Image (cartoon, rainbow, N blue to C red):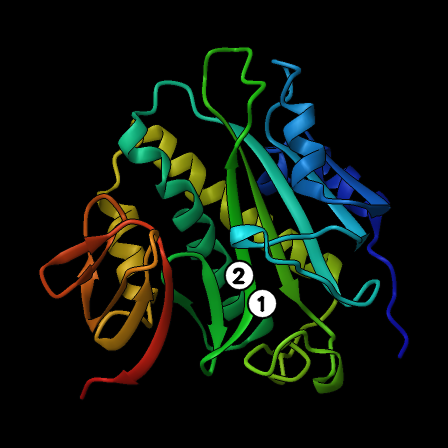
Amino acid sequence: MQRPPLDAEQLRRSVVDSPELSFFSRIDVVESTGSTNADLIALAADPDADHVVLLAETQVQGRGRHARPWVSPPRAQLAMSLLVRLPGIGPASLAWLALLTGIAVVDALRTTAGVAAELKWPNDVLIEGRKVAGILAEVASGAGSGAPAVVIGLGLNVSLTEDELPVPHATSLTIAGARESDRTVLVRSLLTEFARRFTAWRDADWATDELAAAYRERCATIGTEVRAELPGGRTLTGVAAGIDDYGRLLIGDQAVSAGDVTHLRAQY
């Protein structure tokens, strides 16, 4: 299969030429790296590094939540990380950055790729119940400016075939019949949506009311019977009633802040 490279020069120029992407200080593309998240966490030791994007054509040590491997053939997915600093944000609001990223991914895929993307709490993106993208946010240790520095990683399956999928419940934009699979176009759309959401959140002094409403509207987990595997080995089963103001999943009368969630069946 022919898989063209990202147009690195176009993406670099867009920081200057595109009003929508001037939010970013730089967009870098490398042929191969271990982990784009690890690279930007290291970069965060420079207090001037902010609003930086790194993409890799191949990621040999990619990982998702709980250090699970995230692999794909070269140029078959988007492996992208963003470094942002959040001056003045409260600790309780910081977790919303990953959820904001999920909203941005869903909106970009709906508008640009023409697919019915949805969110599975907390940070997975689904098409028809199959995972097409995952998001991993990590607090960087080198926040020298005093503002929290966070690296958000995104892995998006673009042109993988059924035989190339890492697990049966995954999918790709190609398999889902997306009208757009040019990865450079998708990057621009994803970054535009992220910049718009992040700017509005920052300008609202990190208030989460609007984010919470947008997340709930796009979340397929709400109203579904789920099984949550919680830290410590505990399992909780029940109907996901909603998402609270802290971004936690409400299952019955319990608020879940971390765990692996499996959709069991929809409630009608």
Secondary structure under the numbered disc 2 in the rendered image: helix
What residue is shown at x 77% (from left), y 52% (from top)? 59
Above or below, 254 against 100 in this view is below
What residue is shown at x 72% (from left), y 34% (from top)? 39
Secondary structure under the numbered disc 1 in the rendered image: helix
* Count of numbered tags: 2
What residue is shown at x 34% (from left), y 24% (from top)? 89
Residue 171, located in which quarter of the rendered image? bottom right
Residue hosting label 1: 112
Residue 123, located in which quarter of the rendered image? bottom left
Using the image, tell me which numbered label, if any, was put on residue 108.
2
- The answer to which of 55 and 113 lies nearer the viewer is 55
Quadrant (top left/top right/bottom left/bottom right) for the N terminus = bottom right
- The answer to which of 183 and 233 lies nearer the viewer is 233
Classify residue 159 as left or right of residue 87: right
- The amino acid at mark 2 is Ala
Residue 23's x, y, as percent?
Answer: 57, 33
- The amino acid at mark 1 is Thr
Above or below, 163 against 3 in this view is below
Q: Residue furthest top?
A: 145
Residue 20, located in which quarter of the rendered image? top right
Residue 233's x, y, as percent?
Answer: 34, 58
Do tag 2 and tag 1 residues touch (Cβ < 8 Å)?
yes
State the CA–CA distance, disc 2 to disc 1. Answer: 6 Å
